[in-house]
Amino acid sequence: MLENNFNIKSLTSFKIGGKVRKVYFPTSVDEFAEILKTEPDAKVFGNLSNTLVSSDGYDGVVILTTKMCNVDFSGTRVVADCGIKGPKLAQLAAAKGLSGFEFMIGFPGSLGGNVCMNASANNQCISDKLVSVLCFDGSEVKKYTKAQMNFAYRHSVCMDKKLIVLSAEFELEKADISVINEKMDMNLKFRKGHQPSLALPNCGSVFKNPEGDSAGRLLDSVGAKSMAFGGVHVWENHANFIINDNDGTSLDVLLLMDKMSSVVEAEYGIKLIPEVRYLGGNNKIEEELCEKLLIESIKNLK
């Protein structure tokens, strides 16, 4: 399915964003690969959970994998498409008495993004049970073994080679359903105490933790929890999250990030590096702020 001049705001976890010139919604790996062959410069997203889309929109092509949600179970073996959300996959596996996905129960993102960044939480990570990954390398679909993925903390070969995850295969373990559900409940409880509810518009951690320290601690120590700009504010329970009060704009977010970063740098001499990515290009002020903040601008990535 193709949508022209699509208003993407409601599909972003930040609930911020303008119109995108062309948005594709493939439903299968084959359809996905065909679109990429005809639209080689398209930017690919899953749940738009760590991306700030400009309120002034994006004059390019986007592929959203939200309709690629097929999951096949065969004993303890699982093959899942990139677009399925982490919580849904965790619930499906739990219902079959399969353990290994409990940590994803509170994740806002989709499987493709989780594999790409080797997502982890509560002593579990995506690479633990992974067998292989089907990726698009810009010209063809290739299968990568776990060893070939070069997994590390928040890293995989996908980042080095700009690979796009299409689906992934896992080998899970049989376990008692009640034990699996108990572990997921514990993970949810932990998340609620440390991160905003998925019902609050946000895009996860704003800044990466500097080596040997915590971005949240640094921001808290300089009073970031009391900071706000326009329609957005820093979450009162953890200073490394920005909440959209439903009327915030992308410029509001960037100006607040600039304020947060500047205060920490002035106090400690530490330059916080953003985890948030940016998709835009129609607002010069935003582009300049992204460059200043060292935010990854997706429109410039090949």
Image (spheres, rainbow, N blue to C red):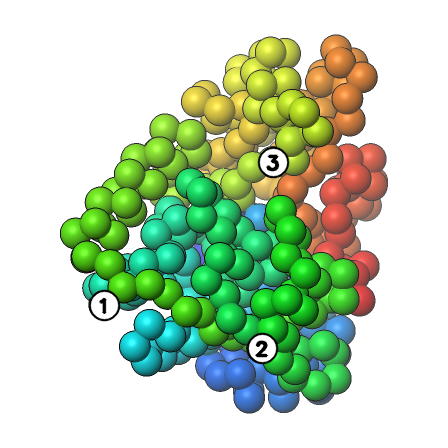
Q: Give the residue pinned by disc 3.
A: 206
Q: Are marks 2 and 3 in contact (CB under 8 Å)?
A: no
Q: Residue furthest left?
A: 178
Which comes before the other along the chain, label 2 or label 1?
1
Q: Residues within 10 Å of mark 3 (few under 14, many from 20)?
A: many
Q: How far separated are the C-alphas under marks 1 and 3?
A: 35 Å
Q: Residue at x 43, y 76 (%)?
A: 79
Question: Residue 216 vs residue 243: left or right?
Answer: right
Q: Nearer the viewer, residue 241 or 105?
A: 105
State the quadrant of the C terminus. bottom right
Q: Quadrant of residue 255?
A: top right
User: Residue 243: x and y, percent?
Assistant: 49, 34
Please tell me the numbered disc located at residue 182. Answer: none
Q: How far separated are the C-alphas under marks 2 and 3?
A: 29 Å
Please tell me the numbered disc located at residue 134. Answer: 2
Q: Give the residue pinned by disc 1.
A: 96
The residue type indicated by label 1 comes to Lys
Q: Are marks 2 and 1 in contact (CB under 8 Å)?
A: no
Q: Residue at x 73, y 66 (%)?
A: 162
Q: How far separated are the C-alphas under marks 2 and 1?
A: 24 Å
Mark 1 or 3: the one toward you: 1
Which comes before the other along the chain, label 1 or label 3?
1
